[in-house]
Amino acid sequence: MNNIDTKLLRIFLVLMDEKSVSNASLRLGMSQPALSQILIKLRDLFKDPLLLRTRQGMIPTDRAIEVQTSVKKMLGDYDQLIAPKTKFDPQTSDQRFVITCPEYAEHLLLPQLLARLRIEAPQVRIEIQQPQPERINDLLERGEVDFRIAWVLSPAQTLRSIALFQDHFVCLVSRNHPTIQDTISAEQLLAFPHVRTLGTGRSTSNSVIEKTFEQFGGKVKHNFLVQNLLTIPLIVAQTDMLALLPSLLSTGFTKQYPD
């Protein structure tokens, strides 16, 4: 504040409210002579009389009214800056949290999360957004996104992270598949077309899957891309196509689609 004493500015606001040195001195618990000296300092600081004596009492100058508006805002921002952080109360908070996560994590975690929130934090708002891997670190650092749920191989050092759960990929195949029964070979894995979601770019999981295929000496040449994750088990159940999906997700699908 360019070495301006905040106490001096608060006294200025009292003087502007009371428009009387005697009334302001009573309110502040100061002597009138001491307050008159402070008024002199304020006049020198703002290069303006600020309060003028008239028969009707003291009236503020145009400059004083202008300064009063700025000082109120300045002190309000300052008080907010130094105020102790309000303790988070889940029962009363109506805070909005933005989370980015893949469709898989949303399908797996969100129902249980919202069920618990309805009990413990009924007014909290949750917004799930699509993953933006290329922008996510910047969005998190700027506070535009609160949480990211994803498979992150190398978390940024500037951000806090914690392992949420572990999973692995399994191959989803129709129980009525013409060739594949209880087991699947690497040749079969590469021979039949695969279906997967289009996603929002080259995901970490797809990259790992492609590298694994390369270790088998090949790659999937007939990927069928769909928009909705929930479409995949329906396609697999009715065709000879395969799908590589996280185990926790596939378990639910096998119960929901017995074919």
Image: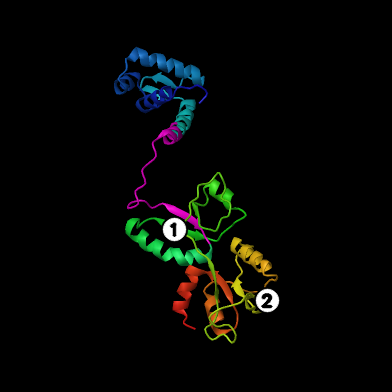
Residue tagged 1: 126
**Amino acid type of the residue tagged 1 in the rendering:** Ile
Residue tagged 2: 222
Are the residues flagged by discs 1 and 2 in contact, CB closer than 8 Å?
Answer: no
Q: On screen, 203 above or below 26?
A: below
Q: On screen, 169 above or below 27?
A: below
Q: Is residue 180 left or right of residue 9?
A: right
Specify few, some or many for label 2: CA neighbours under 10 Å numbering under 14, 14-19, or 20 or more: few
Q: Quadrant of the rendered structure where residue 185 is?
A: bottom right
Q: What residue lies at 40% left-to-right and 13% top-to-bottom?
A: 37
Q: Which secondary structure lies at badge 1? A: strand
Q: On screen, 89 above or below 33?
A: below
State the extent of the magenta-drawn residues as a range. Answer: 75-101
**Mark with earlier residue (1, 2):** 1
Residue 88 in magenta stretch: yes
Residue 232 in magenta stretch: no
Q: Horizontal and vertical percent for residue 256?
A: 45, 78
181 vs 227, nearest the viewer: 181
Q: Horizontal and vertical percent for residue 110?
A: 44, 63
Q: How much space separates mark 1 and mark 2, taking CA atoms?
A: 37 Å
Colouring convention used in this rendered image of the protein: rainbow
122 vs 46, nearest the viewer: 122
Q: Horizontal and vertical percent for residue 242?
A: 59, 77
Q: What residue lies at 50% left-to-right and 47% top-to-bottom?
A: 160
Specify few, some or many for label 1: CA neighbours under 10 Å numbering under 14, 14-19, or 20 or more: some
Q: Is residue 157 left or right of residue 21?
A: right
